[in-house]
Image: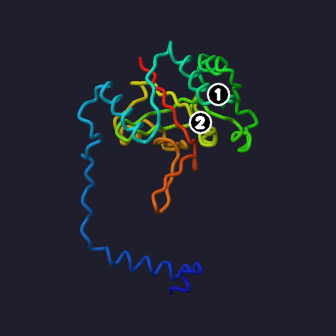
Amino acid sequence: MTYEASTGGSGARERILARVRAAVAHAPEAPAVRRDYRTSHTASDDPRVLTDLLERNLTDYRATVHRTTAAALPALVAALLNGHGARSVVVPDGVPPAWLTAVEAAAAIPVRDTGPLTAAELDACAAVLSGCALAIAETGTLVLDGGPGQGRRALTLVPDLHLCVVRVPQQLVASVPQALARLAPTTPLTWISGPSATSDIELNRVEGVHGPRTLEVLLLEG
């Protein structure tokens, strides 16, 4: 029987299924699955509380967090790019014009993903500037779904520096269940909790192995 099943014998398959059906024929029905579990561990849904929590958790993951406004964002982006010495920046389709102005103000070259760019071309770019789909306060996680201003996954995984803009409170949720309820299950998602890092058995931490070595998060308030 085992040999027939492993080679696709239909007779063996039916005999196995028949035994399974006979074994469970008189089994009690499975209890209904309860869905009344908590969807958040945060006591308050106040945007200020969630924003503070997001900042703490992002910082705990060794990301650098900046709070800014729409008026101050271009100058902040330019300052960060200059501070890191980034002279070429990948800019996904759909980013606001002010972001492009900020890149040019930093004397950096905005690079579009036309072609698309190869892995080697992306690796030659110093930074990427993107938005996100959501940010999760309880886990300090940014979620990208490839929407406008985010680009395909490789854009935010290959360059060594990632500047990510999060609109708060519009793109802020408390928990993973709340995030999943707002995300399309058929869309490739990138979940980012701090800069890319790994460690060996001796817990020697190495950053930049699977993605950007440096993550700058810009919380765009209002």
| The C terminus: image quadrant | top left
Q: Which residue is drawn at 26% across and 74% down?
A: 26
Amino acid type of the residue that numbered disc 2 sits on in the rendered structure: Leu
The disc label shown at residue 21, or none: none
Q: Is residue 78 left or right of residue 26?
A: right
Give how far apart the Cα atoms at labels 2 and 1 are: 18 Å
Q: Which of marks 2 and 1 is nearer the N terminus?
A: 1
Q: In front of the other: label 2 or label 1?
A: 2
> Percent x, y for residue 211?
58, 45
- Foreground residue, 95 or 102? 102
Amino acid type of the residue that numbered disc 1 sits on in the rendered structure: Asp
Secondary structure type for disc 1: loop
Circle 1: is it few (<14), some (14-19), or many (20+) Cα within 10 Å? Answer: some
Secondary structure type for disc 2: strand
Q: Quadrant of residue 151?
A: top right
> Percent x, y for residue 17?
43, 76
Residue under label 2: 161
Q: Quadrant of residue 163?
A: top right
Q: Is 155 drawn above or below residue 26 in the view shown?
A: above
Q: Residue at x 46, y 42 (%)?
A: 193
Q: Which residue is drawn at 27% across and 40% down?
A: 41
The residue sitting at the top extreme is 71
> Percent x, y for residue 6?
56, 80
Q: Do the residues labelled 2 and 1 touch (CB within 8 Å)?
A: no
The disc label shown at residue 93, or none: 1
- Foreground residue, 21 or 206? 206
Q: Is residue 193 left or right of residue 156?
A: left
